[in-house]
Image: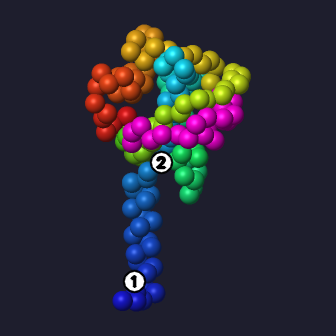
Amino acid sequence: MRLSFLHRSTLALSLAVRAYLTPLAFGTMGLITNAEGRVLVVRHRYMPGLGLPGGGAGPGEPPAQAVVRELGEELGLSSCAMPELFGLYTRKVGWTTNLVALYRLRDAVIAFKPSLEISAIAYVDPANPPDDTSPATRRRLAEFTGAAPIGAYW
C-alpha cells in the first residue's frame, strides 16, 4: 500500500520526535588481551578509576570497524586480529541510553602516547584488577574470566 504524502510526513515527524525523546548513542569498547592473558585498562583524564578503552561509532559505521578506529585514535593501535564480539550492553546516562558493544581484540600492536583523553595504560590480571578499577570494568573482567555470567547492563 502506498502512503500519502501526509501519512509519510506524519510518520517521519513521529519518528523524529521519538528519536529526540529517547535518544540512543552507540559505543564500542575494547577488551585487549596480551599473550599472558592480561587485559589492557586505561586511565581517562575525565573520569575516575581504570576503565576499558573505546568510543562512539559514527553514523552508519560498523561497530567492529568503530572499535578498531577508536583504539587507533586513543591508544595508537596499528594492528590486531579480527575483533570478536564479547557482549552487548545497555546503560542509561541522563536522558539517553547507550548501547555498548564490547569486542575482544587479540594480537594488538599498540604504540601508546599519553593524550588529552588518556593519561596511562596498563595490562592487568583480569582475575585480580587494581583497587581503583571502575565498577563496570570489574564486572566486564569478571565476565571475561568466567567468574560471572555476561550481563545485560554496563
Of badges 1 and 2, nearer the viewer stands 2
Nearer-the-camera pick, 121 or 110: 110
Q: Residue shown at 58%/46% (left/top)?
A: 65
Whether residue 55 is visible, yes or no, is no
Measuring from the top left, give residue 122's x and y in whole percent. Answer: 57, 16
Going by the numbered disc 2, the residue's amino acid type is Ala
Nearer-the-camera pick, 41 or 110: 110
Going by the numbered disc 1, the residue's amino acid type is His
Q: How is the image coloured?
A: rainbow
SS at mark 2?
A: strand
| Quadrant that contains the N terminus | bottom left
Among numbered discs 1 and 2, the one appearing first in the sequence: 1
Q: Which span of residues is magenta-colored?
A: 68-88
- Is residue 74 shown in magenta? yes
Q: Which mark is residue 7?
A: 1
Picture quadrant where residue 80 is located: top right
- Is residue 154 shown in magenta? no
The residue that label 2 is drawn on is 25
* 72 on left or right of 11: right
User: Is 96 situated above or below 123?
Assistant: below
Whether residue 62 is visible, yes or no, is yes
Discs 1, 2 touching: Cβ within 8 Å: no
Q: Residue shown at 44%/51% (left/top)?
A: 24
Picture quadrant where residue 132 is located: top left
Q: How dense is the environment of label 1, judged by Cα within 10 Å: few (below 14), some, or many (20 and up)?
A: few
User: Is 49 situated above or below 153?
Assistant: above
* 18 on left or right of 38: left
Tally the numbered discs. 2
